[in-house]
Image (cartoon, rainbow, N blue to C red):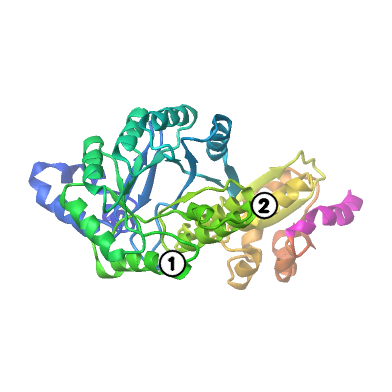
Amino acid sequence: MAFATKLANWEASLDKCPPLQKPEYRNRLEALNEMLKPPVQEVSLKSKTRTVEIGGKLVMYRHEFTYFNPTAIAIDVHDEMEEQLLNSRVNAAQGFSYEYIGQRLKLDLIAVRSTSNDPKTFELTVKKIVAQTDLPLILCSENPDVLEAGIVATGGGKPLLYAATKRNWRQMVELALMYGCPLTVTSPFDLQGLKSLVKTLKELGVKELVIDPGVSWKALPDTVNNFTMIRRAACKFDDELMGLPILGVPAQVWVEEDSRPEISAWKEACLSSMLITRYADALIMHTMEGWALLPIVILRQNLYTDPRKPVAVEPGLRTFGNPSETSPVLFTTNFALTYYTVASDIESGKVDCHLLVVDTEGLSVESAVAGRKLTADKVAESLKETEVEKKVNHKTLIIPGRAARISGELEELSGWSVLVGPMDSSGIPKFIQEKWAGRT
């Protein structure tokens, strides 16, 4: 029953059940696989050392269950790019990193475009990129010879091939089957044509497909509508031909209009955010501007957190700086966003202190107080369990301003004096300087 529950919650896979792998259970295994497979197929992209999964969605709306496999973001380069610029973009994509509520946000892929249409040039470019990064690749060309040269240059990776069209699908099918690579199918702004191509490629034996329905800033309503209809067909109507990962190319805005770079970057960021909220499983972007990329990766992280589980940190006692026995003791809740905000404000203010993290089941201070998840009893119990009184020579606790209502009861239950701190953690350094320095 425990394993079955994990299967239903998509926390385990059937290959983890040894008895089901026996020949006599083959029919049951196939039936279970059919029953449990997600409406949106999962596709793997691989380098020699890293794997990125895209697709694998079970529901159309996040609140229905949860989303799996966050939208993979690729940065594009091309094979006629000056070597210094090529190296710079690849290194920037590889090194992009931002810590957000305790999680490290990164980019996922490199998209290599062939603008030369020359297999040798493309091969050399891919080799340079593979030598610099372990990010999986998207190889972009409508010329099968060029793509084949790129596949060989990866040295054993499993790149995504972009793309099969109405003109070249026969050669692309042969390439995908020969090298076992996933293949993108595209028919811009023609969902019926796209569906027909998918059907043909599936019948020919291509098992891993990704679809690109086309992206345009000038045709924004159609762009968003097509992405939505594809995911709706898969999740609401069990359309297997549309039940594939969706690739969007917001980098397209850079060639649609001759505008200033900052305007193009802004348009690309806006379009990318729309496509993430409208079910894109992978994006190819051009801009490397932090102000454009950062909101995208944060939006992605927010959408792909599990709505059934509050984002929380472990409760307990944290130490900041080099506190002495006279240093202040503060407390906050274990809601991740609250904790990391408080921790950041303490660190930036260079406050030496002890911070008690109280288990509120992942709720913020105000919500936890209102919902009786943060009570004087819980705080008093945390003080006792962590034995913080052995680390300081005083018994004064600074509490969040939004928890002021529990101050009196907390003093009675814990035996500690209570100071009501600022309403916002950004005021902690000033509060400590003004209210605490004089006490010690």
Look at 62% across and 48% down and name the residue there: 289
Q: Quadrant of residue 366?
A: bottom right
**Does residue 17 sit above or below 189 in this rendering?**
above
Q: Is residue 439 magenta?
A: yes
Residue 192 percent location from the top left of the image = 26, 65
In the image, which residues are magenta? 425-440
SS under mark 2: strand
Give percent across and percent down for residue 257: 54, 58
The residue that appears at 47% across and 39% down in the rendered structure is 78
Residue assigned mark 2: 356
In the image, what residue type sits under mark 2? Leu
Question: Which amino acid does the dot numbered 1 rest on?
Answer: Val
Whether pointer 2 and pointer 1 mark residues with C-beta atoms closer than 8 Å, the reply is no
Residue on which the image places disc 1: 224
Q: Residues within 10 Å of mark 2 (few under 14, many from 20)?
A: many
Q: CA distance from mark 2 to mark 1?
A: 46 Å
Q: Is residue 426 left or right of residue 96?
A: right
The answer, for residue 128, to whether it is visible in the render is yes
- Residue drawn at point x = 33 percent, y = 44 percent: 142
Left or right: where 270 falls relative to 69: right
The picture places residue 140, in percent across and down from the top left corner, at 39, 43
Seen at 9% across and 42% down, the residue is: 23
